[in-house]
Image (cartoon, rainbow, N blue to C red):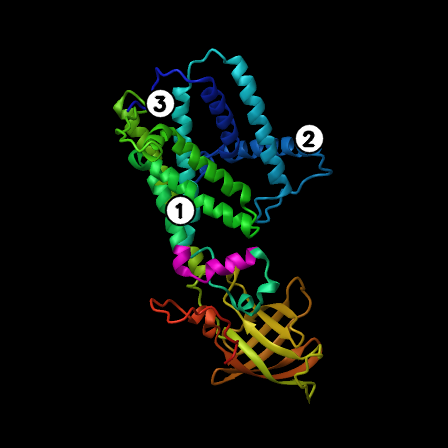
Amino acid sequence: MESPIALNEGWSPFRKVSFRFFLIFFMLFIFPYPLNQNPIAYIPGLNWVWGQYFQGMNWLVQNVGGAIFGIEGQMSTQPTGSGDTTYSWVMSGFYLIVAVGGAIIWSILDRKRRSYSRLWKWFYMLMFYNLAYWMFVYGLIKVFGGQFSEPGIARLLNTYGESSPMRVMWTFMGSSEMYTHFSGWSETIAGLLLLFRRTRTLGALAAAGVMLNVFMMNMSYDVPVKLFSFRLMIAGLWIAAADHKRLLAMFWWNRTVPAQLWKPMFNTPWKNYTLLGIMMLVMGWHIYFYADYGIQNRRNFGPDRERPELYGIYDVDTFILNGDTIPPLMTDTVRWKKTYMDLPGFNGRLSMGIVMMNDQVRSFSAELDSIKPILTLKPFGDTVNVYTFDYSFEGENLSMNGIFEGDTLSIKTTYFNPDDFELRSRGFHWVNEVPWNRRVPYRQ
């Protein structure tokens, strides 16, 4: 079968207009990839160039937000982890307007052009390498356990009703390391398939299918990566569309299809091998970088984190305040119900939660003395108040003594291992006599 990038092929008007639109639209999102990626980004002067470029684009988007979409004031561009901010939506709308307008103007000025086969080849290559890059970014971090970590203690103690839909999805994913790895390998394998000519169409369809699932989860659980996941899904479909005739013949018309003949980028072999070598080096670097990033995340924020000495949940049995034993009344606003210490968070930071009798949770930054059994608590955002406790263990049960908010406290607790929660301890079973769809009490 003739290559879809034959240089002597005349294109239909629809194909030419749609190509112009998609090229402008996707290039606005993709650029300056891969010139802004490590190690290329270390070339002197490039960061200054990209800084000027992004400042100019920011100025345009901010003005479009006010002039076209009626948004008052400056839109925030501070990173929040959300890809669906007001700025992101306005930017996408701006890109869409530019792509439509640019395609119309381009079509008028270049209406005699028979085809864009050579330009299509370069754009097609950029598209599948960029999509493969993002498949590796999202896939490898899941494969190595750097995303969707096992639910922490604070989350295990929350009820479903207290959780946002996104938090429910994060808990659902983190509760099964097997499914998280499966999701990661699905994305990673799709990325690998995109790199090779014979498997590129399969990789594009796989990436589109994987990203459709991601997009629907983002839509269903209000995860703020809807715009980006949708764009990656469309990119996969666009790449696969290069083989649309063969796909339709095989899947719709049920016909035998011959092998696709792809002409090389250049007529000179050494140029093709040089281009292939550059691309393999770039993608090899991406794979190494994000594999290493995933391993480091697993060690720092994932299941391989070192458990601190006070890790666990401690139900408060005895609470002595200034020499008086306080009974466990639900109306009490001073007595503690339980306390817990989770695994280290970002930058190795420890935190400790205190659950009051009315189930209000107070969180503190925690430090453990490396020599003496001393616990130091600091309220987050408070640089003045510091509370110090000495602690000891009777078996696994924790005792604490210290001064907290001006009161002398003496506390005795009973330990509960977070791994005993049904969500963590149930595990996998080939044989289930009855569906194990039930709630198991915190303490049995």
* Residue beneath disc 3: 5
Is 199 above or below relative to 306?
Answer: above
What secondary structure do most residues of the magenta stretch adopt?
Answer: helix
Q: Residue at x 55, y 73 (%)?
A: 340
Q: Residue at x 67, y 86 (%)?
A: 327
Q: Percent x, y for residue 94? A: 61, 31
* Residue beneath disc 2: 68
Secondary structure type for disc 3: loop
The amino acid sitting under disc 2 is Ile
Q: Percent x, y for residue 80? A: 59, 49
Q: Is residue 179 magenta?
A: yes
Q: Callout 3 environment at 10 Å: few (<14), some (14 to 19), or many (20+)?
A: many
Q: Considering only order in the chain, which callout, 1 or 3, is on the residue closer to the N terminus?
A: 3
Q: Considering only order in the chain, which callout, 1 or 2, is on the residue closer to the N terminus?
A: 2
Is 125 above or below relative to 388?
Answer: above
Q: Residue at x 42, y 37 (%)?
A: 236
Which residue occupies the foreground of this view, 280 or 23? 23
Secondary structure type for disc 1: helix
Q: Callout 1 environment at 10 Å: few (<14), some (14 to 19), or many (20+)?
A: many
The amino acid sitting under disc 1 is Glu
* Residue beneath disc 1: 187
The amino acid sitting under disc 3 is Ile
**Disc 2/disc 3 C-alpha distance (Å):** 38 Å
When asked about the image quadrant of residue 54, the answer is top right
Confirm whether residue 335 shows in the render.
yes
**Disc 3/disc 1 C-alpha distance (Å):** 27 Å
Question: Which stretch did the figure color magenta?
Answer: 166-181
Badges 2 and 1: C-beta atoms under 8 Å apart? no
Q: Callout 2 environment at 10 Å: few (<14), some (14 to 19), or many (20+)?
A: few
